[in-house]
C-alpha cells in the first residue's frame, strides 16, 4: 500500500465506473474498544462482495481522503482513506490507517469476487 | 495465590476463534501438556481476517492479512509443539451470526472424533470479543449435551472487566515459568499482532509483582460447571 495520490486514485476509480463490480466496505474501531475504555461507544459496519455498478466516483479532500460512488439509485462512500494499492487479483484497495497503524476504514473493489 | 500441578490428560482439545488467542492465554499450559507428549489438538476457527494492525506505513492489507496470520499460527503451534493444528475456515467477526446449530455441531464433531479428557476455550459471558463469546457458547452446548459421566473437563479463559466481581477468581492457577520461553516464542510468532506490545510487555513481565509479571508467568482457568452457574441458553 502507498500513500494516496488523489489524481492516480481518481483515474482508478474512473476505470471501474459503469462496470459490475464486487465491493468491500468496512469501518471499525476494534472489538476491544469498549473493553479498554468502557465509555467508548463501539460501532462499525461491514459488507463484503456486494455486487453493484456505479455511474461515477470521486475522490475529495486534502488527505485523509473521502471517496464517494454514485449508484443509479443510491450511494456508497468512505472517509478517512490514507493508502491505496492492489491485491494479487487486481482489486483496487483503499484503506485508512490511523496514527497507530490500525485499519479504521477500507473501501475495495474489483471485477471478481473477494476470497 | 497458590498454584497447582497440571493434571495428566488423555487428549487436550483447545478451541479458540483467532490465531493468537492461544498464545496470550494458554500457550504455557499447552507447552506443559506437549512436553509430556499428551496429544493436543488446537482448532482455530478463523484466520483473524479482520485484524486491524496493518501498520502505518502498511505492512499488510485486508486481503493479504489472512495468509500472514496463517503462517504465524503455524509458527506459534510449532513453538509450543502442537502436532494437530486445525484451521476451521470460518470468518473473523462473523461467528455470532453463524447458524448456532452448525457451530455446536462443529464442536460436537471434534469432541466425538478426539475424545478429549480436557477441553479449553473461553468462558461464556466473560470473554469480551463477540467471536470469543460465540465460540464459548458453542463449546458449552456441545459439552453439555454429553452424558455427565463421559463429559470432558471444561477449562475456560475469562478476562472481561467484571469477571472477578461476578464469577470470582480463577479456580485454577498454573505456574508456567519453566515453559515461559516457549510462551514468548508463541507470542512472537504472532508478530503482526504483538509487535506493538512486545517491548512494553517484556519490560513489564520482568518486573516482579506487576500485573504483567503475573499474567505471563502464571495461567488461569475457570472450571465450567453445568449447574446454576451455567447461563448458556439452549438454541432456539
Image (spheres, coloured by chain):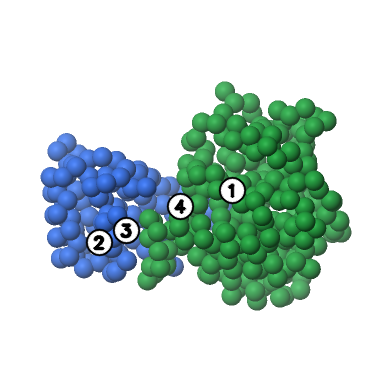
Chain colours: A blue, B green
Residue A98's place in the image compared with A33, above or below, is below
- Using the rendered image, report if marks 1 and 2 lie on a common chain: no
Q: Based on the displayed image, in which of its 4 quarters is residue B28 positioned?
A: bottom right
- Using the rendered image, report if marks 3 and 2 lie on a common chain: yes
Q: Nearer the viewer, mark 2 or mark 4?
A: 4
Q: Please report contact status of discs 1 and 4: CB closer than 8 Å, yes or no.
A: no
Q: Could you tell me which secondary element the residue under label 3 belongs to?
A: loop
- Report whether B71 appears left or right of A102: right
Q: Position of residue B182 (x, y in %)?
A: 69, 67
Residue beneath label 3, please? Answer: A88
| Crowdedness near tag 2: few (<14), some (14–19) or many (≥20) residues, C-alpha within 10 Å | many
Please give the label number shown on residue B222. Answer: none
C-alpha separation, residue under disc 1 versus residue under disc 4: 16 Å
Residue beneath label 2, please? Answer: A65
Q: Could you tell me which secondary element the residue under label 1 belongs to?
A: strand
Q: Please report contact status of discs 3 and 1: CB closer than 8 Å, yes or no.
A: no
- Report whether A115 appears left or right of B136: left
* Image quadrant containing the C terminus of chain B: top right
Amino acid at each position: 500500500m502507498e500513500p494516496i495520490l488523489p489524481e492516480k486514485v481518481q483515474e482508478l476509480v474512473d476505470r471501474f465506473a459503469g462496470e459490475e463490480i464486487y465491493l468491500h466496505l468496512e469501518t471499525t474501531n476494534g472489538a476491544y474498544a469498549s473493553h479498554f475504555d468502557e465509555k467508548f461507544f463501539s460501532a462499525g459496519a461491514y459488507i463484503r462482495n456486494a455486487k453493484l455498478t456505479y455511474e461515477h466516483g470521486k475522490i475529495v479532500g486534502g488527505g485523509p481522503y473521502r471517496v464517494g460512488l454514485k449508484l443509479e439509485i443510491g450511494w456508497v462512500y468512505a472517509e478517512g482513506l490514507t493508502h491505496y494499492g492492489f491485491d494479487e487479483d487486481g482489486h483496487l484497495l483503499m484503506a485508512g490507517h490511523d496514527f497507530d497503524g490500525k485499519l479504521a476504514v477500507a473501501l475495495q473493489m474489483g471485477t471478481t469476487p473477494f476470497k | 495465590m497458590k498454584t497447582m500441578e497440571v493434571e495428566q490428560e488423555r487428549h487436550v482439545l483447545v478451541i479458540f476463534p483467532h490465531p493468537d488467542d492461544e498464545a496470550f492465554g494458554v500457550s504455557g499450559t499447552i507447552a506443559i501438556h506437549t512436553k509430556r507428549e499428551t496429544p493436543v489438538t488446537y482448532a482455530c476457527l478463523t484466520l483473524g481476517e479482520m485484524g486491524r494492525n496493518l501498520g502505518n506505513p502498511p505492512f499488510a492489507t485486508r486481503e493479504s492479512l489472512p495468509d500472514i496470520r496463517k503462517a504465524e499460527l503455524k509458527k506459534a503451534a510449532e513453538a509450543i509443539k502442537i502436532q494437530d493444528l486445525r484451521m476451521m475456515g470460518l470468518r473473523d467477526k462473523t461467528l455470532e451470526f453463524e447458524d448456532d446449530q452448525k457451530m455446536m455441531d462443529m464442536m460436537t464433531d471434534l469432541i466425538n472424533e478426539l475424545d478429549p479428557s480436557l477441553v479449553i476455550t473461553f468462558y461464556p459471558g466473560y470473554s469480551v470479543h463477540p467471536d470469543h463469546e460465540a465460540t464459548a457458547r458453542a463449546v458449552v452446548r456441545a459439552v453439555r449435551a454429553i452424558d455427565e459421566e463421559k463429559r470432558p473437563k471444561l477449562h475456560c479463559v475469562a478476562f472481561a472487566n467484571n469477571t472477578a466481581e461476578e464469577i470470582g477468581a480463577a479456580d485454577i492457577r498454573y505456574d508456567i515459568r519453566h515453559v515461559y520461553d516457549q510462551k514468548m516464542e508463541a507470542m512472537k510468532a504472532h508478530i503482526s499482532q504483538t509487535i506493538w506490545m512486545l517491548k512494553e510487555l517484556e519490560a513489564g513481565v520482568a518486573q516482579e509483582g506487576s500485573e504483567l509479571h503475573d499474567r505471563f508467568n502464571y495461567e488461569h482457568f475457570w472450571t465450567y460447571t453445568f449447574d446454576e452457574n451455567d447461563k448458556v441458553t439452549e438454541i432456539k
